[in-house]
Image (cartoon, rainbow, N blue to C red):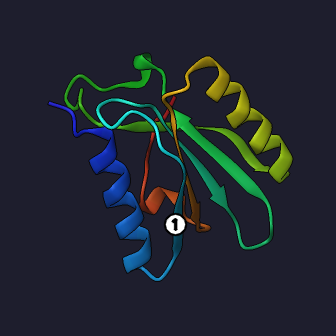
């Protein structure tokens, strides 16, 4: 069974804080199963956007894992904000979490596809 989204987000925020980083919930979505989008702020001012990976990226050995894909890499902040706004119009139950790190792979599993 997959971990509830609210619990996943809470654990992510705690992990980032425990490592001395910054994390914030920009938008709360469905506690049970909302999609999670991660705004990654880099120290040089650029931003990246991690979004849920498509179902085809999931491994049958770990069907309940949360996998992400990078939709924007080191983009301008307004580009990431526009992408999040589009996703929010499509699905109002999404979560948006902001983290500040140059190593998002420390906290997120990325699909290889």
The residue under the point 79% across, 60% down is: 46
Extreme-bottom residue of the structure? 20
Q: Is residue 9 left or right of residue 100?
A: left
The residue under the point 38% across, 59% down is: 12
Q: Quadrant location of residue 64?
A: top left
Q: Secondary structure at mark 1?
A: strand
Expressed as whole percent of the image width and height from the top left, the position of residue 70 reads 61, 40
Judging depth in this view, the residue of 10 and 72 nearest the camera is 10
The residue under the point 41% across, 37% down is: 67
Judging depth in this view, the residue of 72 and 8 nearest the camera is 8
Expressed as whole percent of the image width and height from the top left, the position of residue 108 reads 43, 51
- Label 1 Cα crowd, 10 Å radius (few <14 / some 14-19 / many 20+): many
Q: Is residue 94 left or right of residue 107?
A: right
Q: Is residue 45 left or right of residue 17?
A: right
Residue tagged by mark 1?
Answer: 23
Expressed as whole percent of the image width and height from the top left, the position of residue 32 reads 29, 32
Extreme-left residue of the structure? 1
Q: Is residue 96 left or right of residue 78?
A: left
Q: Quadrant location of residue 61?
A: top left
Establish if 109 lies above or below 85: below
Expressed as whole percent of the image width and height from the top left, the position of residue 41 reads 68, 62
Establish if 105 lies above or below 68: below
């Amino acid at each position: 069974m997959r971990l509830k989204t609210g619990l996943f987000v809470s654990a992510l925020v705690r992990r980032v804080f425990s490592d001395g980083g910054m994390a914030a919930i920009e938008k709360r979505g469905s506690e049970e199963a909302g999609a999670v989008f991660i705004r990654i702020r880099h120290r040089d001012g650029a931003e990246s956007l991690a979004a849920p990976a498509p179902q085809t990226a999931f491994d049958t050995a770990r069907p309940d894992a949360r996998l992400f894909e990078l939709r924007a890499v080191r983009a301008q902040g307004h580009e990431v904000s526009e992408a999040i706004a589009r996703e929010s119009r499509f699905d109002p139950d999404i979560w948006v979490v902001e983290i500040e790190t140059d190593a998002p792979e420390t906290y997120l599993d990325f699909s290889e596809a």
